[in-house]
Image (cartoon, grey):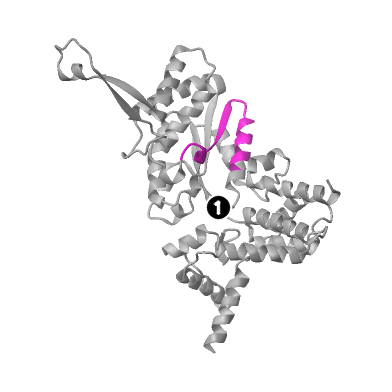
Amino acid sequence: MSNRLKLFRERMAAFEGAANPSEAIESGYYVHAPGKLLVDTISNRIALRPFSSHLLLGGIGSGKTTQLLVACKQINEIEDTHAIYVDVSLYTDISKITSGVLTAIVGLELANLMRDSEDGNVKKYINHINKIAFGYTEDIDINKLASAFTKSSIYWKVEREGIITGQSKTYGVKAELVQAVSNLSKEALTKYGYIVFLFDGLDRLDNAQTFTQILSSDAKAISFTGIGLVLVAPLIAIYSDYRDTLDKSLDYFYYQPFFDVENDLEAYNFFDKIIQTRSIKNFIEEQAIKTLINFSGGVLRDFISLTQAAIEETYLSGEYQVQQKQVLKAVDSFSRSQLLGISDKELNILKQIINTEKLIPKTEFIPRTDEDLRLLVRRLILEYRDPKIRYAVHPAIKPVIEAIIETDASLNF
C-alpha cells in the first residue's frame, strides 16, 4: 500500500467516526465545546436528583447524540448511579412508535441488566416483560369458556401481539407492564444503585402529536417506576400546539442550538480544534479550514461531512494537501443535494430571508408555517441562540440561492 493511500485512509477514518459519535468519543476525538454545556448541567442535576426527568431539543446535527453519550459517561462516574444509553431506532421503527414502547424498552434493558440473577421473582418479572414486549401464544380452553360443566378440553391458540412488535391502537401504558418494570427496577436498584435512561433517536419523529402522547404516557410511567429519564425531542415539538405539554411532562427542558461560528469566536475555535484533533499538521491548509468552518454554519454533522468530502476530493485530484478548491467542490455538491426536492414556496422563503438581511431595519424571520418548519428540520434555515435568537440560511446553500435571486433579477430587468 502506498504512503499516500495510507495517509488518506487514516484521515477519512478519523472523520468517519463522527457518523457514530460513540466511536468518536472512544477514539479520543471528542472535544469539549465552549461555555457551560448542557451535558454538564444534565449530569449535575441527575447527580442531585436521580429520579428527575429531562427533555433535550435541537436540530438534527447539532450534537445532541454526543451530548447524551458524554452525559451517560459522566452519570456512570457517580458512585451510586447507573446510566443506560438507548438508541430507540434499534428497537423499533421511529415513524411507527406508539405509547408503551419506551416503557417496554426500559423493561427489556433492565431484564438484560439482571439476566444473571438466580432470584425466582426476578426471573418471573423478566419473563413477563418479554411476553408483553414481544407477544406470546396463549392456549385457551374453548369448552371452559362455553360451559363450566364440560369436562373435555379443546384448546385454541391465540396470538397476543407485543407492544414493540405490534402497533398499539390504544393510548397509554398497560398497568401490568408498569408494575412489572417497577418491580424489576426495585431489584436493579439494590444491585446497581439509581437507574437513569437516556433515550436517543426520537428527534427523527416528524409528528409532534405522537411525540407528545409518548411523552405524557411513557415518561410519566417510567418516572413512576423510580427511574431517571433523559429524552431527545423532534425540533417540530417546540413550535407545535403541544408546547405546553412538553413543559409540564418533565422536570427540566433544554435546547441545543447550532454553534454561531460567524459571531462567536469561542464557537469558531471549537470547530478549529476538532480539525486539529482529527487531522495532522499541514494536511488541510489554513484557508481551507476557515472555509470549512464558515460553510458548515456551525452544524457539527455538516462540518464533518464537508471535511470528509473535501478529503475525498483531494485524494481523487492526486494532491496531498486539502486546499480551498477541494472544499468549494465539496460545498457545491453538498448544497445541491440539500436543495433537492425543495418546493417553490420554500425557495421563496429562503430568497426572502436573504433579501431582508440587506434591509435596514432588518425584518426578522419567525417560523410559523409548515414550510418554515420543514426548512428548519432540513437545516436549510439554521437557528442560533447565543447571545440572542437569530435565523439564517445555511451558508453552504446561500450562494446557490443568491445566484437564483440574481438570475431572477436579470430576467425581470
Residue shown at 72%/59% (left/top)?
A: 310
Is residue 99 part of the magenta span, yes or no? no
- Report which residue position mark 1 lands on: 60
Say which amino acid is labelled 1.
Ile
The crowd level at tag 1 (other Cα within 10 Å; few <14, some 14-19, many 20+) is many
**Res 281 visible:** yes
| Residue at the far bottom in the pictured view | 413
Q: Is residue 363 left or right of residue 327?
A: left
Magenta residues span 67-92
Residue 157 x %, y %:
30, 23
Q: Is residue 25 above or below residue 153?
A: below
Instruction: Answer with left or right where residue 22 lies relative to residue 346.
Output: right
Q: Is residue 233 visible?
A: no
At x 45% / y 71%, what residue is drawn? 345
The residue shown at (46%, 44%) is: 94
**Where residue 302 appears, x then y in whole percent?**
63, 56
The residue positioned 50% from the left and 68% from the top of the image is: 365
The question of residue 85 being in magenta is answered with yes
Please name whichever residue, 397 or 321, is drawn nearer the observer in this view of the structure.
Answer: 321
Q: Quadrant of the C terminus?
A: bottom right
Q: SS class of the residue under badge 1?
A: loop
Quadrant showing the N terminus: top right
Along the line of sight, the residue nearer the viewer: 107 or 259: 107
Q: Does residue 187 lie above or below 251 as drawn? A: above
Position in image of residue 120 (x %, y %): 45, 12
